[in-house]
Image: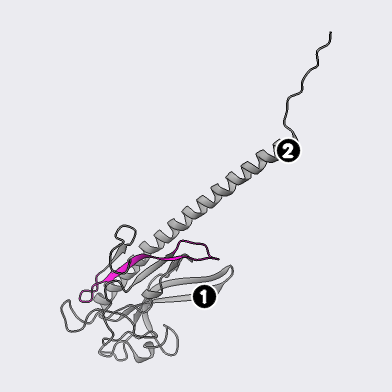
Amino acid sequence: MRTRRTQSGMTLIEIMVVVAILGLFATLAVAGIQGMMDRQRVSSAQRELLMVAQEARQKARSTLQPVRLSVTTTVEPGGSVTRLRWEALACSNAWGSVCPMTNCESNACGASGCTCTETGTPVVVPRGLDVTPLDGLCWLGTQEPGGATPPAVVRTGGRACLPGSPRPTDGQLVLKRNRGSLQSPQWHNDTVMVVDGLTGAVRSVDCGKTPLAPGCT
């Protein structure tokens, strides 16, 4: 008596199900890795921005010239790119008593007669980070700590970097992070840059660790 040999194997439907499951896992893995890379990119940029602010303060104190932070956005292949750098603004006279030069009060370096003696290395700002509050933050560099004029000021409009501008207050320089997607952004207060109005010293406050800090709530 002959016995029938059974053939084992997978049907086409079973193969399609396995492929679909593997594809789903691969998609989730790629999304997770991409999200982790984006978070690391934003965190790295925040550390670089803090260093740029510290460099601006040191430059202002060493040269006794006003140094401001400037944010620019340019359209490049692949989309728009935002950068932040510090700019040492020139004075209108050789004695350095009229600083910054008048042309720099409303113009960027190199535009409409605004001259910068030196500029820092630009930091590329990721799309998931909003650094608009830092644009125009300026260290005067003309007074020692405790002097009549605070070394650090916030622009009152345009690119003005004048002694009469108000000091930055706690919770004013808030960096927002996009925790959604580029198509459906969800901006949340992520980091607060705290600048001492008399010394110009700068530090960052992580809203994730101190959610009740000024500017985080």
Residue 188: image x %, image y %? 41, 65
SS for callout 1: strand
Residue 215: image x %, image y %? 32, 69
Q: Residue furthest right?
A: 1
Residue type marked 2: Ile
Which residue: 49% across, 75% down? 73
Magenta region, residue range? 178-201
Residue 65, numbered circle: none
SS for callout 2: helix
Which residue: 45% across, 71% down? 83
**Where is mark 1, residue-wise?**
74
Q: Residue furthest top?
A: 1
**Where is mark 2, residue-wise?**
13
Which residue: 38% across, 84% down? 159
Instruction: Reply yes or no: does residue 212 show up in magenta.
Output: no
Residue 45: image x %, image y %? 41, 63
Residue 147: image x %, image y %? 16, 81
Above or below residue 61? Residue 34 is: above
Quarter location, residue 86 = bottom left
Above or below residue 7? Residue 140 is: below
Residue type marked 1: Thr
